Amino acid sequence: MTPNPPEGPESRWSDLERPPLNAASLRRALVRDETLWTSLDVLESVGSTNTELADRARVGTARPGAVLVAEEQTAGRGRLDRTWTAPPRSGLFLSVLLAPQAPAVRWGWLALLTGVATASALARTAGVDTALKWPNDLLVEVAGEERKAGGILAERVTEETVVVGVGLNVSLRAAELPVPEAGSLALAGAHTTDRDPLLRAVLRSIADWYGRWDAAAGDHTASGLLEAYAAGCATLGRTVRAELPGGEELTGEAVAVDGDGRLVLATEAGVQRPVAAADVVHLRGAA
């Protein structure tokens, strides 16, 4: 952790177009008795917000409803232990600690729920049409191309709790993209790249969707989550290649998301096969 980063003219923290988050203002707006969020901390730099918040939960210094935000992640993680890197203050890097009342067998929906919540918040606040790529990517359109601007990672911490992390490129410039397939809200023509209102909108949207889902005992249909996810998922209706653990590859049309949050592929052999964990590559557009 770096509590007091240098602010000289050559400092990577001195970009005036990327002001720091206002932690006190965010707490006043989000941490209230009647809301889901119980605490909100903003760190200058941390390895991974998911790892840090999970560690705090295990030793009892974070309770359900805790929000941890970082101005910079030095060891941000995605699925399959992939790294997530971005310049300081160029994005939203946050994790939340949840203790669902819903049965643990339905917790697999939390990453999909967070995707729905984040996409809807960005549409309202930044004016960016954000699509969902199964299972955990946030896509935007840059110069007519589909680009990944964010990702979500849900990890079980204890028998009662799960941490869900969101990484989102906000003001990343073209020269700063880690790979050509990456994007950002700025490059997608966002109305604003002010991270304070964006963070408020995302957290309020997560709280809203989580409340509905948990009140419905994790029922994806009764809570409206399945319908919302299907409507925003860019993977459904497309021909995709699923790269499965162990090296197996499966090609077919993505026809549905089932009750367990798995992607269902219709293969050329006429078989519908659910996929629980895979890297999915979009091959062709919707039929």
Image (tube, rainbow, N blue to C red):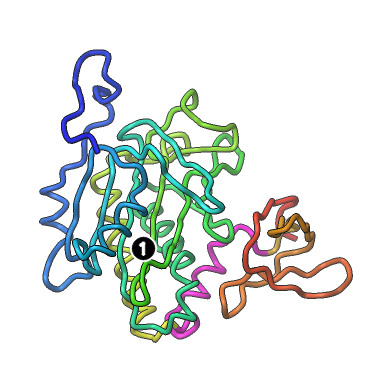
Quarter holding the N terminus is top left
Which type of secondary structure does the marked residue at label 1 adopt? strand
Q: Residue at horizontal 39%, vertical 63%?
A: 117
Query: Residue farthest to the right?
Result: 269
Task: Let me know if residue 225 is in the magenta part.
Answer: yes
Residue 67 located left or right of residue 238: left
Q: In front here: 89 or 239? A: 89
Q: In front here: 241 or 46? A: 46
Q: Residue at horizontal 56%, vertical 61%?
A: 135
Q: Is residue 144 above or below residue 109?
A: above
Q: In front here: 231 or 159? A: 159
Q: Residue at horizontal 42%, vertical 84%?
A: 103
Residue 167 located left or right of residue 244: left
Residue 89 located left or right of residue 77: left
Q: How dense is the environment of label 1, judged by Cα within 10 Å: few (below 14), some, or many (20 and up)? A: many
Quarter holding the C terminus is bottom right
Region in magenta: 219-236
- Residue wearing tag 1: 163
Q: Amino acid at mark 1?
A: Val
Q: Residue at horizontal 30%, vertical 35%?
A: 89
Query: Residue farthest to the top?
Result: 9
Q: Residue 48 appears at what percent x and percent y?
A: 36, 47
Q: How many marks?
A: 1
Q: Is residue 222 above or below residue 269?
A: below
Q: Is residue 138 above or below residue 260?
A: above
Residue 121 located left or right of residue 144: left
Task: Let me know if residue 76 is in the magenta part.
Answer: no
Q: Residue 247 appears at what percent x and percent y?
A: 75, 55
Q: Residue 21 appears at what percent x and percent y?
A: 21, 41
Q: Residue 273 appears at what percent x and percent y?
A: 75, 73
